Image (cartoon, rainbow, N blue to C red):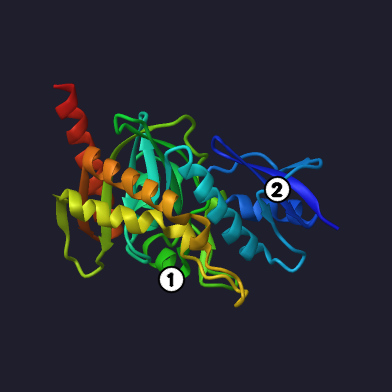
Amino acid sequence: MTARWLIRSASRRLVVEGPPHLGLWWPTLSAQIPGAYGWPVGVGNGPAALTLTDATAPAEARRIINARLHVEHLGADTLSLHGVAVAKAGRAVLLIGDYGAGKSLTGLSMIMSMGWSPVAGDTCLVRLDAQGNAEVVGGTRAFVVRRFATDRWFPTLAPSEGDGERIDLADSLPSLECGTPRLAGIVMVAVDGGGFASPPVPCGGQVAANALCRASSHLLTKVLDDAAADPLSLMEGPALARRRLRLVRRLASTDRCWWVRGTPDEMAAAVDAMTREEDQRWAS
C-alpha cells in the first residue's frame, strides 16, 4: 500500500509516492531536509516526482528526497550549499568547509554568545537573482555535531548519555530566524585547537568558486545503502549541472569570501567582528 505526499521546501513542492509511514518519520526527516516546513500533505491521484518503496529506510528516504529537492531548487536559481548559516539584523553569514572543519561549532558559538540566530544547520538554500544578489531562503533545522566535539567545546549544551557519535541539537537551539536574510558574506572555516588563530583573509574568486562548487554538490554525493541504486548525481543531468556552475560563479563573483582558522570561539569572534566592520563601512 502506498500514499502520495506533498512535501514543501521553501518555495518548491515535491510529490512523493511512498509508504504510509512516511508521515510517522517526518519529525526526524524534516529537521534534515533544507527549507522543509509543515507536515507532508496527502494528495490524491496524479504524477509523483519520486517513488519510495516499503523497503526504503528513513535515512535512505531523506537522502533521496534531498537529492530531488536539490534539482527542484536549481530550477528556481537556488543553490543547496553544504554549510551553516547564521543571521543578525537581516544579514546572513554562510560558513563552509569540509566535514569536521568546524562549521557547526563556529555557528553554535555565534548563536550562544554573540546574538546570532540559526538559519541552516547543515544545508543552506541560497537564491540568486539576475543581478547576483543572494538571499538565504531556508536551510536544515538540525545542527548535527560530533559528540566528542560537543563535549570538548560546549559541555553544557548536550548530555553525553546515549548511543551514536553525533548529536542532533535542533531542539536545543532558539527558533530559526524568520524572513529571508540577505547573504552578507561567505567564510571558509578550519578549526585548529592548537592555539593557532588567523584573522579573516580574503579569498580569491577562483578559490571561492571551487569551494562553493564542492559545497553545492553535497546532496548529490551521498552513497545509498542499496548497492544496485543509481548514483544520486544522475538526478541533476548535464543541463542543470551547467546551471549550477553558472550560479556558483555568479555567487563567488558578487559575494565576498574569507578564510579563517582557529578554535570555534576564536573563529566566531573573528567573523562577528568582521561583519560589524563591514556594517560600519557600508554605513559610512
Q: Are marks 1 and 2 in contact (CB under 8 Å)?
A: no
Kindly state the secondary structure of the residue where label 2 is placed: loop
Residue 192, image quadrant: bottom left
Relative height, residue 227 to residue 17 (above, below): below
Can you give x and y, in whole percent of width and height, for residue 3 in the image? Answer: 80, 50
Amino acid marked by disc 1? Phe
Question: Tag on residue 4?
Answer: none
Q: Answer above or below: position of 82 versus 111.
A: below
Which residue is denoted by mark 2 in the rendering?
48
Kindly tell me whether residue 187 is visible in this rendering.
Answer: yes
Q: Name the side, left or right, on which 229 lies relative to 275.
A: right
Q: Residue furthest bottom?
A: 227
Which residue shows up at 47% across the image and 29% down it?
Answer: 179
Residue 11 vertical placement versus 96 (above, below):
above
Q: Nearer the viewer, mark 1 or mark 2?
A: 2
Residue 49: image x %, image y %?
65, 49
Q: Residues within 10 Å of mark 2 (few under 14, many from 20)?
A: some
Which residue is label 1 attached to? 148
Distance of mark 1 from mark 2, alpha carbons?
41 Å
The answer to whether 164 is drawn above or below residue 130 in the figure is below
Of the image marks 1 and 2, the number of the one nearer the N terminus: 2
Residue 70 x, y percent position in the rendering: 50, 50
Q: Residue at x 47, y 55 (%)?
A: 237
Q: Residues within 10 Å of mark 1 (few under 14, many from 20)?
A: some
Residue at 47 percent across and 68 percent down: it is 147
Quarter placement of the N terminus? bottom right
Task: Tell me the residue at 36%/56% (across/down).
Answer: 215
